[in-house]
Image: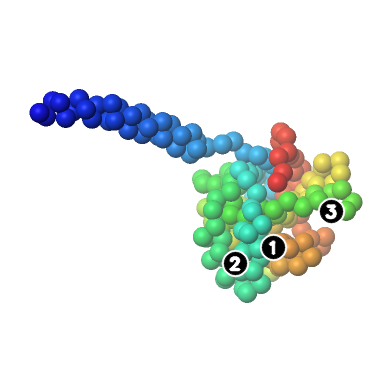
Amino acid sequence: MHTNTFLRRGPALALVLAWMAGASLVIVAQTETKGPIERFTGTTVNVTGAGDPFKIDLLRWSTDAEREQLLASLVKSDKDLASALEKAPTLGYVWTSESAGYSIRYAHHLTTPDGSERIIIATDRSLGSWDPRIWKAPNPSAATSYSFSVIELRFNRQGIGEGKASVLAKVVPDSAAKTIALDNFAGAPVVLKTVKREGGSTRK
């Protein structure tokens, strides 16, 4: 009796097992880590660790909903933005000579009317969290005290770029561009020089 029951259920059981195997393969395929859609490299300047190489690996851009949520948080306060960044998904990583990288929680791309580019990213930790010695401002009075970091890269039409960061600039909402940004970008000290886009560009 038990044998007959097993035989009757055999085909059904085989189908279930086959479905489970197929589902597992789909899950594995979906969870495989994809390569970066953008990679930027350069070196630091105007900080105590000047000359340190850095690399930004971006896996995806923030969605409009994510951008709006973080912008609304900054409008409330720096503390609200810090909390929102901690809860946001990881979109990529910033790598330096420090022992660990920084998780990117915000990434936004803008093209300006003159053809230049603005790329704004934010991490949930301040630059120098792993090694404060290399991210200190030469002039302590110019330093900020955010628990997160905002980096803004700008490229001209020839693709030559530079970057500035919240270690030496204030973070503000840019209502015109609808993004978080650095205050008075033109007047802020350069922190990342010889910034290059490595490989192709994949924008949203």
**Which numbered disc, 1 or 3, marks the residue that appears first in the sequence?**
3
Give the amino acid type for the residue marked by disc 3 in the picture. Thr
**Which numbered disc, 1 or 2, marks the residue that appears first in the sequence?**
2
User: Which corner quadrant holds the N terminus?
Assistant: top left
Q: Is residue 165 left or right of residue 18?
A: right
**Secondary-structure class at tag 3:** loop
At x 73% / y 34%, what residue is drawn?
A: 200
At x 63% / y 59%, what residue is drawn?
A: 65
Contact between marks 1 and 2 (CB within 8 A): the answer is: yes
Give the numbered dot on residue 81: 2
Residue 143 visible at all:
no
Distance between the alpha carbons at the discs numbered 1 and 2: 10 Å
Total numbered badges shown on the rendered structure: 3
Residue that mark 1 sits on: 180
Give the amino acid type for the residue marked by disc 1 in the picture. Ile
Distance between the alpha carbons at the discs numbered 1 and 3: 16 Å
Q: Is residue 80 left or right of residue 119?
A: left
Residue 124 visible at all:
yes
Q: Outermost residue, left direction? A: 1
Give 68 or 146, whichever is nearer the viewer.
68
Give the amino acid type for the residue marked by disc 2 in the picture. Leu
**Secondary-structure class at tag 1:** strand
Residue that mark 3 sits on: 112
